[in-house]
Amino acid sequence: MLGDAFLRGWYSTHDYNSKMMGFAPHATSTKRAPVKGTVPKEMMDGGMDVVLIVVLSIIIVTVITLSIVFITLALNGSLGKGKDDMMVFIIKE
């Protein structure tokens, strides 16, 4: 979850057995050392908020991807090209 922009300038360690992560700035880093925090006693429950975010993200990515495909096809002049160079729509009731 933590990307390159967040981790830049840090050494990071991962203890999978204890489910903990550690950070320390490297020698040429301009970041100051992190301060010790508290370990949560229980896991956060995202509940339906997490499901909603995932579903909306999938929908947004799908719409963007389809838009890019259709724009690319339209710019290449291949949108609607098919048998006998005509577009066919099938409508089912």
Image (spheres, rainbow, N blue to C red):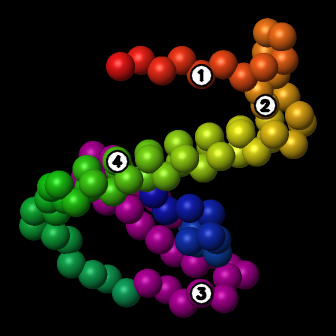
Residue 79 is labelled as 2
- Figure check: 32 above or below 54: below
- Residue 69 found in image quarter: top right
Q: Position of residue 45 (x, y in %)?
A: 14, 59
Which residue type does callout 1 highlight?
Phe
First in sequence, mark 1 or 4: give its number.
Answer: 4
Q: Which residue is mark 1?
A: 89
Q: How far apart in space, not on screen, are marks 1 and 2 (Cα)?
A: 13 Å
Residue count near mark 1 (Cα–Cα under 10 Å), binned few <14, some 14–19, many ≥20: few
In front here: 27 or 54?
54
3 vs 1, front mark: 1
Q: Which residue is mark 4?
A: 55
Q: How far apart in space, not on screen, are marks 3 and 1 (Cα)?
A: 59 Å
Please report contact status of discs 4 and 3: CB closer than 8 Å, yes or no: no
Q: Residue placed at 27% from the left, 81% from the top?
A: 37
Q: Which residue is mark 3?
A: 31
Which residues, given as a range, are shown in magenta?
12-34
First in sequence, mark 1 or 2: give its number.
Answer: 2
Residue 71 is labelled as none
Q: Quadrant of the C terminus?
A: top left
Q: Quadrant of the N terminus?
A: bottom left
Single out the residue that lies furthest toward the top. Answer: 83
In front here: 4 or 55?
55
Indicate yes or no whether the magenta region holds residue 25.
Answer: yes
Q: Position of residue 34 (x, y in %)?
A: 43, 84
Q: Residue placed at 25% from the left, 50% from the top?
A: 51
Q: How far apart in space, not on screen, are marks 4 and 2 (Cα)?
A: 29 Å
First in sequence, mark 4 or 3: give its number.
Answer: 3
Q: Would residue 15 be visible to someone looking at this image?
A: no
Indicate yes or no whether the magenta region holds residue 59.
Answer: no
Q: How far apart in space, not on screen, are marks 3 and 2 (Cα)?
A: 52 Å
